[in-house]
Image (spheres, grey):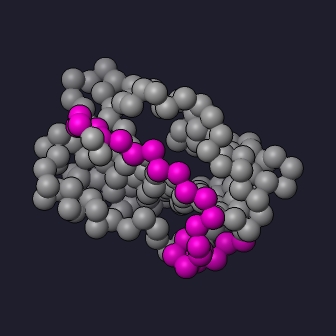
């Protein structure tokens, strides 16, 4: 079983200041898992938005492999699971090209972090930060809270200009 927990934090220009950034930093990088369906790939998607004072809303889904989910593709590679970054359109930074992020062996746990500035056809920008926890192991409610992370990739950048 592959378990994916994506924590998405979304905010607008109005929340760019230090006080709002402090609120965003208080959001945990992992949550307890709810009961999950029996499927090759299960996803616990948590969305926290500025407009709802960063209160998380959650959705659980199940998928077959291979699957492409929110900028990442998951596919079996022998007994391992290959996690590949895909293009995220209308977003800054634009230099995140498709490529392998992790090759998770059975029993391993990884964390991927990235952030984006989106504009699309709108004249207003909004920002997202993703923390994606991935486990190639059986479901356990606290799998992302108590397990050591075997692989970690942090691709967060300064979204406002300057250095991060």
Measured along the vertical axis of the image, is residue 50 above or below residue 145?
A: above
x, y percent for residue 91? 38, 29
Is 42 one of the magenta-colored residues?
no
**What residue do we see at 21% from left, 56% from top?**
21
Is 151 one of the magenta-colored residues?
yes
Outermost residue, front direction? 163
x, y percent for residue 136? 71, 62
| Helix, strand or loop: magenta stretch | loop
Picture quarter with the C terminus? top left
Answer whether residue 38 is visible to the viewer in this image. Answer: no
Q: Quadrant of residue 80?
A: bottom right
- Decide which of 148, 140 is in the foreground and name it: 148
Q: Is residue 20 left or right of residue 157?
A: left
The total number of labels drawn is: 0
Measured along the vertical axis of the image, is residue 66 above or below residue 81?
A: above
Answer whether residue 108 is visible to the viewer in this image. Answer: yes
**What residue do we see at 33% from left, 65% from top?**
27
- Decide which of 78, 14 is in the foreground and name it: 78
x, y percent for residue 112? 52, 52
Which region shows up in magenta?
A: 138-162
Measured along the vertical axis of the image, is residue 162 above or below residue 104?
A: above
């Amino acid at each position: 079983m592959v378990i994916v927990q994506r924590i998405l934090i979304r905010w607008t220009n109005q929340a760019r200041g230090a006080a709002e950034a402090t609120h965003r930093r208080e959001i945990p990088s992992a949550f307890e898992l709810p009961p999950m369906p029996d499927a090759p790939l299960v996803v616990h998607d948590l969305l926290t938005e500025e407009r709802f004072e960063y209160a998380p809303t959650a959705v659980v889904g199940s998928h077959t492999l291979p699957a492409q989910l929110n900028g990442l593709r998951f596919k079996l590679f022998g007994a391992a699971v290959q996690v590949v970054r895909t293009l995220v359109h209308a977003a800054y930074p634009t230099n995140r090209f498709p490529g392998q992020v992790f090759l998770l062996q059975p029993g391993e746990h990884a964390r991927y972090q990235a952030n984006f500035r989106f504009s699309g056809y709108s004249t207003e920008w909004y920002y997202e930060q993703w923390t994606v926890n991935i486990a190639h192991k059986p479901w356990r409610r606290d799998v992302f809270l108590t397990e050591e992370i075997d692989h970690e990739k942090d691709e967060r950048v300064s979204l406002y200009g300057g250095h991060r």
